[in-house]
Image (cartoon, rainbow, N blue to C red):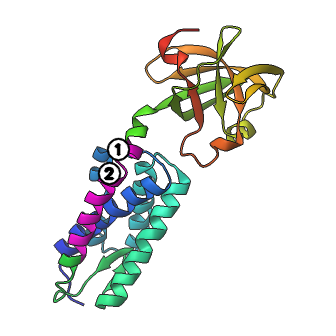
């Protein structure tokens, strides 16, 4: 089948941008526009360049690394994005009698409908950017943090919650997912009362230290909450970590 290389690269790049933005919105996972623009053309370009034996595996690795890097190795969003892209590619392949080579869609040279598809995808990107403006603004409050508890050190993403200002015995209280709890060897050692909207309740905590990227390490109380599961971040930070007010 005769196909235009530039069509494959352009359509593949736009398709990647569309599914990555959509996945970031649906999975509430932050993405950086610069990283997205740099990585989106890599897999389509390599699919057109690599035609040696075993090239399919090189293209597969580049495809996998690209999508993982865009979402900072967030597996849920990465799997969702890959699944969405392949579904779209298979649909367009059947519709326009194209072929799927090296995991990229190659269309017949006589196919002009790709212009329609590219236009629709670009329009979708514009719409979704406006629709998720508030959601993307939330990512401005996501920070890379390093958590240390006992002999464990974990690199996490933390969301600044302006409503969480609880400080107990000089230590800010932060919350992590139960998935993080399973990775720690230190077990909860204390039960502390905290004031909530619903009244005073007791939480089980462990002493730890937290370092926000570019900042100093600070002692914290670490509690765990099931409500943080699948929120797109690992920890709910305390506003006093930034203000220094206890």
Residue 8, above or below 65: below
Q: Is residue 138 visible?
A: yes
Residue at the (40%, 59%) spot, across then down:
22
**Is residue 67 found inside the magenta-colored segment of the image?**
no
Q: Is residue 45 visible?
A: no
Q: Secondary structure at mark 1?
A: loop
Residue at the (34%, 44%) spot, across then down:
32
Main secondary structure found in the magenta portion: helix
Could you tell me if the residues under marks 2 and 1 are in contact, i.e. CB atoms within 8 Å? yes
Q: Give how far across and how far down residue 23 sits, in percent.
A: 44, 58
Residue 109, above or below 70: below
Between residues 202 and 205, which one lies in front from this camera angle?
202
Question: Image check: 214 left or right of 6?
Answer: right
Residue at the (30%, 87%) spot, across then down:
98
Q: Give how far across and how far down residue 241 sits, in percent.
A: 53, 17
Question: Image check: 131 left or right of 160?
Answer: left
Q: Which mark is residue 36?
A: 2
Between residues 145 and 243, which one lies in front from this camera angle?
243
Question: How many other residues sit within 10 Å of disc 1, few (<14), some (14-19) or many (≥20)?
Answer: few
Residue 137, above or below 202: below
Q: Which mark is residue 64?
A: none
**Is residue 130 found inside the magenta-colored segment of the image?**
yes
Q: Secondary structure at mark 2?
A: helix
- State how far apart marks 2 and 1 are (Cα): 6 Å
Q: Give how far across and how far down residue 192 sits, in percent.
A: 79, 19
Residue 197, above or below 229: above
Residue matched to label 1: 32
Q: Which quarter of the figure has residue 12?
A: bottom left
Magenta residues, as a range? 117-136
Between residues 198 and 226, which one lies in front from this camera angle?
198
């Amino acid at each position: 089948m005769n196909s235009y290389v530039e069509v494959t690269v352009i359509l593949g790049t736009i398709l990647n941008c569309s599914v990555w933005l959509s996945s970031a919105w649906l999975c509430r996972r932050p993405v950086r526009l610069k990283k997205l623009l740099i990585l989106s053309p890599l897999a389509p370009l390599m699919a057109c360049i690599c035609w040696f034996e075993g090239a399919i595996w090189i293209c597969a690795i580049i495809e996998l690394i690209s999508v993982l890097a865009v979402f900072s190795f967030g597996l849920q969003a990465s799997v969702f994005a890959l699944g969405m892209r392949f579904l779209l590619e298979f649909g367009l392949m059947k519709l326009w009698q194209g072929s799927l080579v090296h995991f990229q869609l190659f269309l017949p040279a006589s196919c002009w409908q790709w212009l329609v598809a590219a236009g629709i995808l670009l329009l979708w990107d514009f719409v979704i950017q406006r629709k998720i403006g508030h959601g993307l603004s939330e990512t401005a409050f996501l920070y890379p943090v390093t958590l240390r508890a006992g002999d464990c050190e974990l690199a996490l993403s933390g969301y600044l919650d302006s409503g969480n200002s609880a400080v107990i015995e000089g230590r800010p209280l932060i919350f992590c997912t139960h998935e993080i709890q399973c990775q720690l060897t230190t077990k909860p050692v204390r039960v502390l009362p905290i004031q909530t909207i619903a009244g005073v309740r007791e939480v089980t905590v462990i002493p730890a230290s937290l370092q926000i990227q570019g900042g100093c390490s600070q002692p914290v109380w670490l509690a765990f909450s099931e409500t943080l599961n699948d929120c797109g971040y690992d920890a709910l930070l305390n506003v006093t970590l930034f203000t220094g007010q206890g």
